[in-house]
């Protein structure tokens, strides 16, 4: 566990979905942290994901309506006790792809 500096505080912002065509969609979001860590891990539509804080993450070719819905947990790679949970609603069709997510 990381024990120096500012306590970790992760949040997930700027979530955008777009239809990629042929029954697939793309999701983009940014994970930010006000603590010491520089990288995060998590899940996107049930698949493992990772990235750098403040850099937009993009996941493509996710099948519309087939991935699980529910909470995704994001964890600081340096401090396993530093986590954030964000609900992700998977579009059921391309008409709902462009709706803002909660």
Image: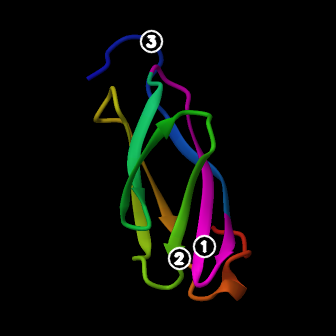
Q: Nearer the viewer, residue 9 or 53?
A: 53
* Magenta extent: 17-36
Crowding at mark 2 (Cα within 10 Å: few <14, some 14-19, many 20+): many
Q: Is residue 32 a member of the stretch shown in magenta? A: yes
Q: Which residue is mark 3?
A: 5
Residue 65: x and y, percent?
Answer: 50, 85
Crowding at mark 1 (Cα within 10 Å: few <14, some 14-19, many 20+): many
Q: Which residue is mark 1?
A: 25
Marked residue nearer the N-terminal end (1 or 2)? 1
Mark 1 lies on a secondary structure that is strand
Residue 100: x and y, percent?
Answer: 71, 69
Q: Nearer the viewer, residue 19 or 31?
A: 19
Looking at the magenta stretch, what is its main secondary structure? strand
Residue 76 horizontal side relative to residue 34, left or right: left
Crowding at mark 3 (Cα within 10 Å: few <14, some 14-19, many 20+): few
Of labels 1 and 2, the one closer to you: 1
Which quadrant of the figure has residue 50?
top left
Name the residue: 44% across, 31% down: 39
Residue 22: x and y, percent?
Answer: 61, 83
- Looking at the rendering, in which quadrant would you find the N terminus? top left
Marked residue nearer the N-terminal end (3 or 2)? 3
Name the residue: 56% across, 87% down: 92
Name the residue: 38% across, 43% down: 41
The answer, for residue 74, to whether it is visible in the render is no
- Looking at the rendering, in which quadrant would you find the C terminus? bottom right
Q: How is the image coloured?
A: rainbow
Q: Which residue is mark 2?
A: 90
Of labels 3 and 1, the one closer to you: 1
Q: CA distance from mark 3 to mark 1?
A: 39 Å
């Amino acid at each position: 566990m990381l024990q120096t500096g500012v306590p970790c505080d992760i949040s997930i912002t700027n979530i955008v979905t777009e239809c990629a065509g042929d029954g697939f969609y793309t999701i983009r979001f940014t994970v930010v942290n006000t603590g010491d860590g520089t990288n995060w891990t998590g899940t996107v539509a049930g698949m493992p994901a990772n990235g750098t804080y403040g850099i937009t993450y993009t996941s493509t070719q996710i099948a519309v309506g087939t991935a699980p819905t529910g909470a995704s947990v994001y964890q600081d790679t340096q401090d396993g006790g530093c986590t954030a949970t964000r609900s992700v609603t998977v579009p059921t069709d391309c008409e709902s792809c462009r709706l803002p997510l909660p």
